Image (cartoon, coloured by chain):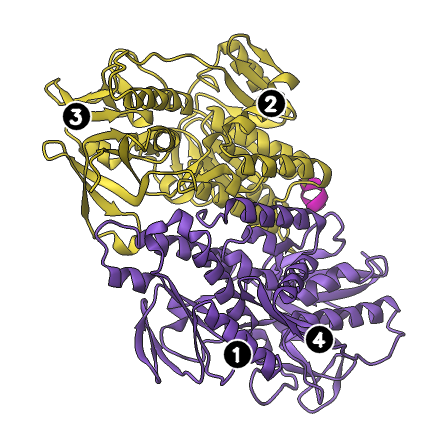
Chain colours: A yellow, B purple
Amino acid sequence: MSSKEKVVIIGGGWGGYRLGYGIDHRKYDITLIAPDNTSAVTPLLASAACGLFDPRLAHEPIRRKDFHAKYIKAFVVDIDFSRQVLVCQPAFEELKEDRFEVSYDRVILTPGCRSNTFGIPGVAENAIFVKTVANANTVRTRLNDILEMASLPGISEARQRQLLHIVIVGGGPTGIEVAAELTDLFEGDLGVLFPHLKGLTSVSVIDVAPQILAPFDQRLSEYACSALKTNKVKVKLNCHIVNVTKDTIETRESGITGYGMLIWATGNRSIPLVDQLQLRKTEHGLVRILTDDHLNVFSPDGNVIPNVFAMGDAADIEGGTLPTTAEVAIQKADYLIRLFNSGLKDTRPFKYQQRSLVTYTGAWDGVVQGQREYTGYGAWLSWRSGNFFWTRSWRRRVLMCYAWFMDWLDGREIIRN
Amino acid sequence: MSSKEKVVIIGGGWGGYRLGYGIDHRKYDITLIAPDNTSAVTPLLASAACGLFDPRLAHEPIRRKDFHAKYIKAFVVDIDFSRQVLVCQPAFEELKEDRFEVSYDRVILTPGCRSNTFGIPGVAENAIFVKTVANANTVRTRLNDILEMASLPGISEARQRQLLHIVIVGGGPTGIEVAAELTDLFEGDLGVLFPHLKGLTSVSVIDVAPQILAPFDQRLSEYACSALKTNKVKVKLNCHIVNVTKDTIETRESGITGYGMLIWATGNRSIPLVDQLQLRKTEHGLVRILTDDHLNVFSPDGNVIPNVFAMGDAADIEGGTLPTTAEVAIQKADYLIRLFNSGLKDTRPFKYQQRSLVTYTGAWDGVVQGQREYTGYGAWLSWRSGNFFWTRSWRRRVLMCYAWFMDWLDGREIIRN
């Protein structure tokens, strides 16, 4: 047996993946537990879903030559903090009744969130989320299907317009990027492969909020909104969804509308493990585990629980709330990597550094907010090079460049399941 | 309306795809009807399934910039030869009760075959076929799952050996290539990503026939068999399967054996349309539509039915039987392309030209039979360059070269769903 301290990381998203590679395996015996053995590059999912490149490029295997941690494909379903033991369920349908235990000396909780349907009837059954590469593949398959269904002989124009109406719920960066990519696709390559469907497609973005892109300044948000409208995206704000069926969506403001694909790009909800744990949590909005500024968690009576850290979308710092973004998860992971690799001697608190926000709005236009704000072609360049930066291996970067070049030269490869 | 003759092609495999691109769209109004809007590059499926490159590279979209035919995503379920009308069912689960008609002036039947389970209980539910890119993806996903399940804490060695035992039924070129690719994977990259599973994997090939690679000479077949055994593949010939469950296979000769993945690479069976049509067909083995040497079909009483042609795996020439291979389908498609593009004036009969047979047996070895026979490293080169030749676009050829280069440099990307 190893005499090194045993560090267990729960979750394989932005935070968990980075911790697994960053904590020094010569100093610690590291185990990463997550239900998926790949880590999604979330900012790439919108483009991948719309055929800009292969969805496989939008995730990274956790197991690689240079990965020195152990990996276990499982859900953590409970934690016994006094015995320092995790209760795990194998992440395979055929083994879902099995349970096994994993002990730890220190544990880092970064399991993320799930999508929130806000209890609206029909959403879970009929909408497509944009959280994983499997979701991006579902969007591609459905896009393929509605284009082919609308091409069947004898179909009415009304039915074609319904099939080719895509509704995106959520005016955040993901929803806006999906809308932008879809209009680029419909205005561009679609005319070559499906010339008979030209003019029959439409894209709507619905949000309950009074503005899109809430994290951006109002000026930039309005710019993005008008850029989307120029690209023929219908933006419906202050809009409340009351019901969804397999081909219609009903809002309090506009009644019932038909659709061919419904993309749900809004709302986070806590996962069952976070609901289950007896820890101090946020009391309003998304349920998140509260930590101090060293990312330690608290028992319900307010004492720090030793050796337990929490970060990523599932956690927040008490008195210093931060958004659920990859950027925050990465900075917290880097903080814990420094802490662990210093032998837990570097006791400075965590401090967040604000970085740029970038969103693509279609037709080589976009918005950037950071040290300076800008819009237009320069913002598009920022966004594309951001995609490049997010990608975590050179192997994938070369493939992405090739895909961009061939998309430009030869058209997108959307017709490929 | 067009005054051109209306030619309908049924099927989008090797034959149908080639006809759709080859028949002159300036002379004919062409429609291709097939349930999938991509065409599988069947010789690449074995390698794609085992992670040599992305399965997406092993199929080609039917709709492309240079595709001038109409495409309809549907099954043809019946043909009224007197009215010259096809009855079609949309190839979408949600529209499977719908029917529509398509009329033709001339029709070419090349709908292919489906897999044959020979009525053995449990095969349809538990085995994975190797006919489409969706199948190749299923093999990859299952491979990924059994490797991860065998890595769960506390699993017994007996259970690991069962999970990592892969059984391939069928000693034809596809089955042998899957076996070869799997042993390459297990002996190579697997040791890096799953070092704890080294020595626990095994591959068996089962066939009811007394030799593998039936289309090859006996000398080459024996060479391939010994090459596979050197690579630790267990080959069981003259072996009769009687029952399959979700994790065991029972043969008359060896009783019950556990497995983790069962790949079914044997046997063709006629599709429902071929069973349904009132045409003259073969009487023994696989049911195929009989044609004359101009590829015209016959009514049951032996008269040629005008304007109806049949080719590919679903058809055979009366008195001159040919195997169900891509090579035969391609040569027949080229024959019909010449016939149609000559305005049906070139009335020479079809003649088959024998080409080389190539199969990979693992570890840079293989067998080639053609104008001259050879084995070993040269045969491996033939096989790889054959893969290259089968690929039907430069876009994909560049990606395949890059994948080979990176596999060699950096290991296969098997852990990626």
- Asked if marks 4 and 2 fall on the same chain, the answer is no
B155 relative position to B228: left or right? left
Q: Position of residue B156 (x, y in %)?
A: 22, 58
Q: Residues within 10 Å of mark 3 (few under 14, many from 20)?
A: many
Residue at coordinates 13% horizontally, 17% vertically from top-left? A302
Residue at coordinates 87% horizontally, 78% vertically from top-left? B347
Q: Position of residue B338 (x, y in %)?
A: 84, 69
Q: Closer to the N terminus: mark 3 or mark 2?
A: 2
Q: How many marks?
A: 4
- Asked if marks 3 and 1 fall on the same chain, the answer is no
Instruction: Give the chain of mark 1.
Output: B
Give the labeled residue for mark 1. B212
Give the labeled residue for mark 2. A229
Structural distance between the alpha carbons of marks 3 and 2: 45 Å
Structural distance between the alpha carbons of marks 1 and 4: 18 Å
- Which amino acid is tagged 1? Ile
- Asked if marks 3 and 4 fall on the same chain, the answer is no
Instruction: Give the chain of mark 2.
Output: A
Give the labeled residue for mark 3. A279
